Amino acid sequence: MAATSARTLRLLSIFGTGAALTAEQLAARLGTSVRTVRRDIDTLRELGYEIEAVRGVGGGYRLGRSSRLPPVVFDEDQAVAVAVALQTAPTLLSGIRENAARALTTLRQAMPARSRIHTEAFTVSAARNYWEFPAPPIDAGAIGVIGGAIHRRHVLRVDCTGEDEPTTLTLEPHDLVVWAARWYLVAFEPDADRWRALRVDRLAPRTSTGRTFDRRDVPHGDPVAFVMGTHDRGDTPAEWPCRGSAVLALPAPVVARFAPGGSTVEHVTDSSCRLTLGAWSWAGLAGLLLTFDADVTDIEPAELRQALHSLRTRIDEGLGPAR
């Protein structure tokens, strides 16, 4: 009976994803037979859960829209995911550390003992190493306002400090993207008839306009690809002991995609751009430039040029005489 109950709860948890799955797919996930799956589905229906049978190609079973999952039904893997997510969220959002800790405590109290043991086995401490270029955590309140406008498709007005001078923008917000430990808003700016990738920490949302908009197709069909390939996304060089720049013989969108967080990319020509970045040493900064495997010119400052000379000397000595 205990095994049957645990399996039925896991089946209910799988249905909670909203996907329609065949009896064969469900049996594979549960490690049981199709006959047992169908019997467990009947059990859930007897308990009052609306399990719909979806016919046709891609059909199967799914949880009906009118059904509600019981409070906290997690399998072991989900319990671990929740514990890790709540413990690491404060590294990306400010002002939620206490709330995240309280949420994790509440969830643990509501979980069955078996799931709770798995969450308590994970205590996560986030630390920064020398090769990370993170941004400060984002204010959770701003994320809430922007996320709400995206969900309701409401036109958003924001004060932006990432421009040459502070300005107010009217935006159609579409997606939030976290990349290189930075939050970006993908939005369409109707007044300029263009798409924007904007750093959220440069935005101060105003009260919602209440005006709705029709969702558009994001460039490249993917908000993540759009952010990564946009060089003028409001980034600024991070504060590091050593900071320099150089012109790379690569297009700005290519460099923007692979540049480390805390760097900036400026368009020079269609086939070149200036990359400004920082590191913990001039040798480290020189090494970052070389990872792009492209011609490098107009290198500043002199300390960076000297570091590249030193690397060349070390490489020549390491390789020995040419054969």
Image: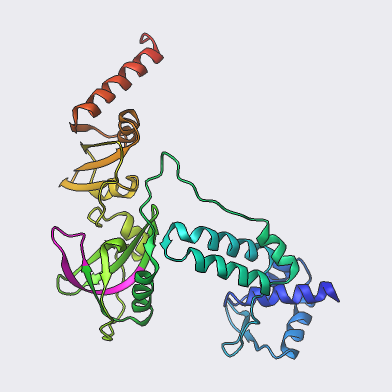
Q: Which quadrant of the figure contains the C terminus?
A: top left
Is 174 included in the stretch rendered in magenta? Answer: yes
Q: Quadrant of the N terminus?
A: bottom right
100 with respect to 219 (left or right): right
Q: Quadrant of residue 221?
A: bottom left
Residue 226 x/y as whole percent = 31, 60
Identified at 62% across, 81% down, the residue is 62
Residue sitting at x 64%, y 65%: 79
Residue 200, above or below 191 = above
Left or right relative to 266: residue 229 = right
155 and 109: which is toward the camera: 109
Residue at screen point 23% across, 66% down: 195
Snapshot quadrant of residue 160: bottom left
Place of residue 322 in the rendered image (x, y in percent of width and height, measured from the top left): 35, 10
244 or 222: nearer the viewer: 244
Image position of 17 with respect to 263: above or below: below
Identity of the residue drawn at 77% across and 85% down: 43
Horizontal side, residue 131 vs residue 305: left or right:
right
Q: Residue furthest front?
A: 98
Magenta-drawn segment: 160-175
Q: Is residue 284 visible?
A: yes
Q: What secondary structure do most residues of the magenta stretch adopt?
A: strand
